[in-house]
Image (cartoon, rainbow, N blue to C red):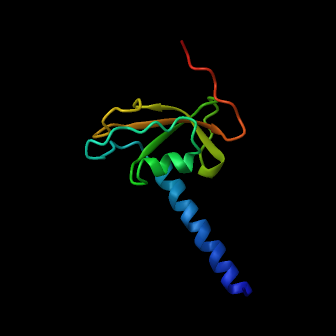
Amino acid sequence: MNHTSTVRTVLAAATAVAALAVSLLGPAAPARADGRPMPDVRGKNLVAAYGDLNYNTTIQFRDGRGAGRLVLWPASWKVCGQDPAPGTPMDDRRITLTVVKSTEECAAPAP
């Protein structure tokens, strides 16, 4: 592979990741999933969780550490909590995932 094709490959990958990050960081708009129930994505890598949500769902993130960190590289985050609860119809629902870095532990749920 020559230098030009390597640069193009890297730029294409960076563009794809940036597009995913922008879509993930957008404002939490109501989801439209035609009555499909909310899957249980707790404990999953953020990329896998987003795939379970069909990649077309707008999601708001909450930093599970309370530090207000932004999700810039979804592959390095995992889901600790979700709203709505698993099984809830997703039509016109705002989806919020509480996430932490993949190397961090999820906080114990509040009683």
Residue 104 image-quadrant placement: top right
* Residue located 28% across and 39% down the image: 92
Residue 16 image-quadrant placement: bottom right
Q: In the rendered view, does 1 fall on the left or right side of 91?
A: right
For the image, the number of numbered tags is 0
* Residue located 73% across and 85% down the image: 3
Residue 107 position within the rendered picture, expressed as x and y whole percent measured from the top left:
64, 24
Quadrant location of the C terminus in the rendered image: top right
Residue 62 position within the rendered picture, expressed as x and y whole percent measured from the top left:
54, 35
Instruction: Pick the residue in front: 68 or 36.
Output: 36
Q: In the rendered view, does 18 fall on the left or right side of 87?
A: right
Asked if 92 appears above or below 2 in the picture, the reply is: above
Residue 67 position within the rendered picture, expressed as x and y whole percent measured from the top left:
64, 32
* Residue located 41% across and 52% down the image: 54
Quadrant location of the N terminus in the rendered image: bottom right
Instruction: Pick the residue in front: 28 or 88.
Output: 88
* Residue located 30% across and 42% down the image: 36
Q: Residue furthest left?
A: 34
Residue 42 position within the rendered picture, expressed as x and y whole percent measured from the top left:
53, 35
Asked if 76 appears above or below 8 in the picture, the reply is: above
Q: In the rendered view, does 108 fall on the left or right side of 57?
A: right
Instruction: Pick the residue in front: 46 or 20.
Output: 46
